[in-house]
Amino acid sequence: MPSRRTDDSRDRKPQSKQRINEMIKVPQVRVISDEGMQLGVMPTFEALNTARQAGLDLVEVAPDSKPPVCRIMDYGKFMYQQKKKQTKQTVHQSKIKEVRFRPKTGEHDLQVKFNQAKEFLLHKDKVQVTVIFSGRELAHIDEGEKILERVLQELDELAKIESPPRRAGKRIVCTLAPKI
């Protein structure tokens, strides 16, 4: 019977790149204060005591230099700011959102769907406007075209037509892209 591993390495969180406080094992470090002033090269235990007296952490910021450079700072605040910077850098990816209509869609429902499409466009997403026909509604394609024209007029100031209205089976489809 094969032996099972007792320490499951998959459950562990990855270690952060920076060593802090007692994780710093080198005998001497170059220290920068929390105000940004150079405190010089000192033994690691002394730098750690200086950081503790200030109520802060000793964080290794340049591990490859000789001796390693450590900074006295609030590590939690530092990580929060790093995470905040990272989220600011993410770019909004445009998605295609669909708004469906029927030839018999009521007036209030039309207004709700117009507002929904406006929200999508303001959020910089593309909108695919679809008018769906079923059964006897296929005999009244002109009603669907009127609804589509009304949608295009309503969204004219926010959107430009990316693909013009076209018939595809029991549907009329048109794609709109945000102007801004």
Image (cartoon, grey):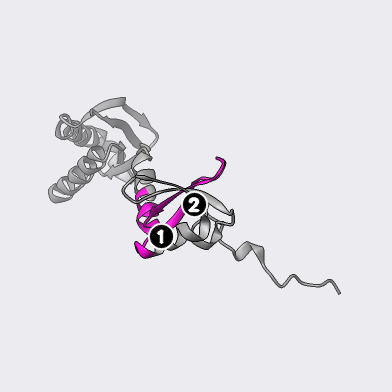
Q: Amino acid at mark 2?
A: Met
Q: Which residue occupies 40% across, 60% down?
A: 51
Residue 71: tell me if it is visible.
yes
Residue 69 image point, x, y percent:
49, 45
Residue 114 image point, x, y percent:
18, 42
Front-lying residue, 26 or 77: 26
Q: Which residue occupies 13% across, 50% down?
A: 108
Q: Amino acid at mark 1?
A: Thr
Q: Of marks 2 and 1, which one's residue comes earlier in the chain?
A: 2
Q: Which residues are magenta?
A: 53-81
Residue 68 image point, x, y percent:
53, 45
Q: Which residue occupies 40% across, 53% down?
A: 72
Residue tagged by mark 1? 50
Say if 159 sits above or below 101 in the image: above
Residue 59 image point, x, y percent:
46, 53
How many numbered discs sit on the rendered protein? 2
**Disc 1 secondary structure class:** helix
Residue 114 shown left or right of residue 13 in the figure: left
Residue tagged by mark 2? 42
Is residue 3 inside the magenta stretch? no
